[in-house]
Image (spheres, rainbow, N blue to C red):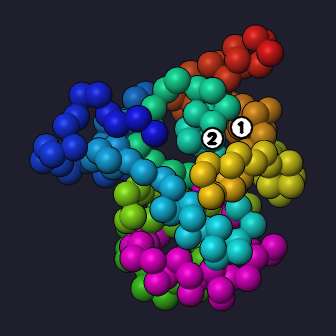
Amino acid sequence: MRPHPRKDPRCATAGVRHDDADDDVGTFDTDYAIGFDPFPTLAIMQDSGADFAVFGQVAGIMHGSLELTGDLDILWDPSQSDVGRMAQVIGSAGLSFRDDEHAAITDLEFGLALPKLYFEGLGCAGDLCTPLLPWGALDVHAFLQRKSWSQVETLAVPYLDLQDLIEMRRQVARPKHVRRARELEALVALR
């Protein structure tokens, strides 16, 4: 990920969290964009043995999007993962977790039973989501089965298939998602 061009990594933070991001701009204008590095968290997820894939703008970038981001969205399937092992591995990594009400999660096995957790630490923040979230008519289990893979140094990064990512963005329909879906659709037209 490229650093934020308008923010010096040595500057003071503004107190804008990733979940306070503007619906149009996205997380690129939050404190978490400063020094954003998703790879340590992705390595932890890989070590946990969880069935997961990156979605959101990091996946968009992996498909060729030019719009930057400041958060990492991860979709994982608890029915295909060893939740106890995952809790142990990611719990010992120094990440902090909160629920949708912003309450701290200290019992990570309990937290992993929730549809969504916020996480922070190791150079990024983001959302850890499951198929239990209300995804409308989307079959996110199938999205996980169709995921793509990219090798980044020693890390195999799973991310959503391009058409699935576009469909997910269309379903959410927030301004940034619609804009990013259009960009990806234009990339599909060029292929």
Residue sitting at the far left:
12
159 shown above or below 128: above
Examine the structure image and report whether residue 142 is included in the region drawn in magenta.
no
Q: Amino acid at mark 2?
A: Ala
| Residue 17 location (% of width, % of height) | 31, 51
Which residue carries the number 2 mark? 59
At 67% across and 53% down in the image, what residue appears?
Answer: 157
Quadrant for the C terminus in the image: top right
- The number of numbered badges drawn on the structure is 2
Find the distance from the CA under tag 1 to the CA under tag 2: 8 Å
User: Residue 121, position in %: x, y?
Assistant: 37, 65
In the foreground, 2 or 181: 2
Q: Which residue sits at x=41%, y=43%? A: 70
Q: Earlier in the sequence, mark 1 or mark 2?
A: 2
Quadrant of res 93: bottom left
**Is disc 1 in contact with disc 2, using a CB cutoff of under 8 Å?**
yes
Q: Secondary structure at mark 1?
A: helix
Q: Which residue is mark 1?
A: 165
Residue at (49, 26) in percent of width and height: 67
Q: Is residue 172 visible?
A: no
| Residues in magenta, as a range | 74-100
**Residue situated furthest front in the rendering:** 153
Which x, y percent locates residue 131?
73, 61
- Coordinates of residue 161 in the picture (x, y in percent): 78, 40
Q: Which residue type carries mark 1?
A: Leu
Q: Nearer the viewer, mark 1 or mark 2?
A: 2
Q: Is residue 166 visible?
A: yes
* Disc 2 element: helix
In the rendered image, the vertical position of residue 131 relative to residue 171, given as above or below: below
Residue placed at 41% from the left, 35% from the top? 2
Quadrant housing residue 10: top left
| On screen, residue 191 above or below 3 | above
